Image (tube, helix red, strand yellow):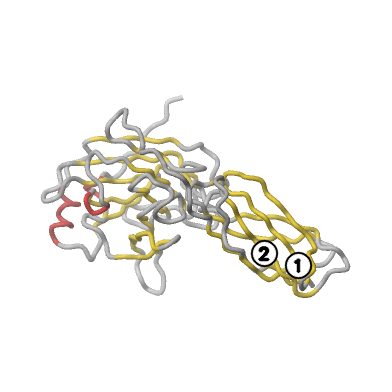
Amino acid sequence: MARERAPRPRIGRLTAAVAVCAVTAALLVGAAGADSTISFSDPNGDGGSSTDINAVEISTSAGFPGFSGGIEFWATVKPDSSWCRAEGGDVPLLVAVDTDQNPDTGSAFYGTEVEFAFEPSGQARAGEGIFLRAHGWDFRRVAFPDGFGWGCGPTGGGYGAALAALGLSPTSGFNVVVATQGPRVDTAPDIGTFDYQPVPGTKPPALGPDRRAPHVVAYAASAVHGRVAKLTYWTLDGRGKTADTIRIYRGTHLLKTIRRPLRNSNPFLVSHVTWRVPRTVHGRLRVSVRSADAAGNTSPLRWARLVVR
């Protein structure tokens, strides 16, 4: 069945960031429209009861005075009660871009180098788009790039910037992943990234050996003896595949080992395992987590506390 395409703001209608210079603001206001658009689909309904991303569109425009071109990332969503209802409102999305198409460099979020995100309103402060660059395995907020802006409508939202500000040219390929910001995360694609190539037939660069270990965070938990404990950890790997080993100790005595085989691991989601606590166990326990990637690189051992009542 044909689906009606709702109108949406283009690059020239995104809200310009307050801090950008006058020529950049003019860039956003004066752009005539996209020269090309490439679309990627995401399954409907996989966002559960939260915001569900249905498609991602990447549009480029050469009509930016003083710049080599501009780019817009736009996600079409199925709205829910938390979604922006007016153009220029909050944009509960983030867009992460792997500018060199190498998952072994940049952040541990599939090797992305830059991220567009939104800081929601609060404390009498209006919400605003923010821009981040890779800093170690994570990101660090930095100044707005040239042409930075954001926008939101009833069925979508996104960000824009000058291509050169991202280190890209009009013919540069890159990888991109879009995720919702909120208690329940939907990512597009569900695993990995989309391969964007503005020149048809271009292949991404070949990858070298993977020598970067996964990054792991373990979280404290509590449980009741005789019942099931939920143990939460976060494992991030540029290539998105890890095998995880979770061990539970009382003092130095090993109580349980849980192994998860090599699997797709989405760095925008935390992982969980469960363990039924023996009725005779209570008090303060320790949980260790270690992840290995497909190449055998292993993360440092991470520890968290488990308190059993």
Can you tell which quarter of the image residue 263 is in?
top right
Foreground of the two, 244 or 265: 244
The circle drawn on residue 164 is: none
Instruction: Using the rendered image of the protein, determine whether residue 78 is visible from the camera's viewpoint.
Output: no
Residue 91 in the image, given as x and y percentages of width and height? 38, 55
Instruction: Using the rendered image of the protein, determine whether residue 134 is visible from the camera's viewpoint.
Output: yes
Residue 112 in the image, given as x and y percentages of width and height? 40, 52
Can you tell which quarter of the image residue 288 is in?
bottom right
Residue at 84% across, 69% down: 281
**Residue marked by disc 2:** 288
**Residue marked by disc 1:** 249
Residue at 46% across, 53% down: 109
Foreground of the two, 7 or 66: 66
Residue 159 in the image, given as x and y percentages of width and height? 32, 51
Residue at 35% across, 65% down: 141
Q: Would residue 242 appear left or right of 131 to someone viewing this image?
A: right
Residue 235 in the image, given as x and y percentages of width and height? 56, 56
Foreground of the two, 40 or 263: 263
The image shows residue 225, relative to residue 88, as above or below, that is below
For label 1, the crowd category at 10 Å Cα-Cα, with few meaning under 14, some 14 to 19 and many 20 or more, is some
Give the amino acid type for the residue marked by disc 1 in the picture: Tyr
Foreground of the two, 303 or 295: 295
Name the quadrant of the C terminus. bottom right
Q: Are marks 1 and 2 in contact (CB under 8 Å)?
A: yes
Residue that extends furthest to the left in the rendered view of this protein: 66
